[in-house]
Amino acid sequence: MRTNPYQITAFAHVAREGSFSAAAEKLNVSQSAISQHLSKLEQTLGAKLLIRDRDGFSLTTTGSEFYDLADRFVTLDRLIDEKISRYSQMERGHISVIANAPLPALRHIALFNQFYPDVNIDFTLYDWTTATSLLRQRKADIAFITEPPRSDDWLYHKVATVKYVLYVPKGHHLEKRINVSLADLWNEALLLPEKGSLTEREVSQALNKHNVSIRRTIKTTTFPVMKEAILHGVGVGIFLDNSTTQEHTLVSIPIREMSKIYETFIVVPEDKYNLRLIKSFVDVSLGQ
């Protein structure tokens, strides 16, 4: 018995999207059709790919191994389809973009939208660890990651250099400072992202290196949550200086002990780079 491309495609989309209904919607087929394809694929392989549970499903060891091949198959199938079609203008399509900070990702998405307004884009913020993990798992087409790990399977294009700064609300007593020391924050409520983020790791290392303790820290999730907390007077926050557009309600101040320059890259799985949608996104971002 041999698998057919519909079964492989159905499995790849279920694993990538995280649900049968989302996969059915992306492929424009019924949910029952997706279930039938997966059932036949498991029969052919002689092994379970998914284990259903109360929260949905999880991939088996075989499923995790096969997903990598299945997603590569779907990518190659899309590439072949594009080569056969030989269309000169891209009109519609779908790509997924993730990032560990809002900017510069949002700027590049906005620029791409100007050229290709009919392309659907899924954009989600994750902490650094989750973002890199999703890229490794092939759950995203494009990632904007600061200081990404190196992989022979990824292509990298630098799009920004950034530093860490302290964010305070307008009117805060530190607002007029040219710069601050970590020691100046001892009596402040310091907002930090949850464990797994690049910021949490770098701030913790800086505090330990300079033997500085903070009286009170408050854990948040993504920068938009931190920003709202700062504006509401909950505390002050340390984050990358490209995390938000300049505005009069929020002030950023350099930190003396955190002057290191970090690089943000567009990262794309190498085998997906020649897909027209993805290559066009990168080309627009790089001004090509």
Image: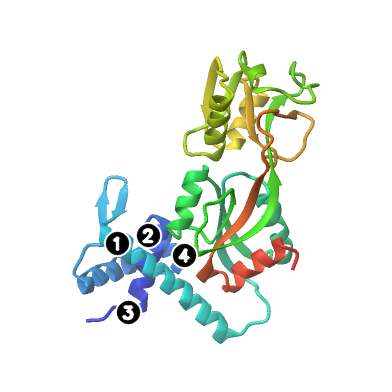
- Which mark's residue is nearer the viewer, 1 or 2? 1
> Looking at the picture, how far across and down is residue 71, in whole percent?
42, 68
Find the distance from the CA under tag 1 to the CA under tag 2: 9 Å
Task: Residue at 63%, 82% (x, y): give it.
Answer: 87
> Looking at the picture, how far across and down is residue 19, in whole percent?
37, 56
Disc 3 secondary structure class:
loop
Does label 4 or label 1 sit earlier along the sequence? 4
Find the distance from the CA under tag 4 to the CA under tag 1: 20 Å
**Which residue lies under the disc numbered 2?**
15
Amino acid found under the numbered disc labelled 1 = Gly
Find the distance from the CA under tag 2 to the CA under tag 3: 17 Å
- Which mark's residue is nearer the viewer, 4 or 1? 1
Residue 26: numbered disc: 4
Task: Residue at 42%, 57% (x, y): give it.
Answer: 137
For this rendering, which residue is in front, 21 or 205? 205
> Looking at the picture, how far across and down is residue 282, in whole percent?
65, 64
In this rendering, does residue 279 appear at all? yes
Question: How many numbered badges does the structure rendering display?
Answer: 4
Residue 63: numbered disc: 1
Find the distance from the CA under tag 3 to the CA under tag 1: 17 Å
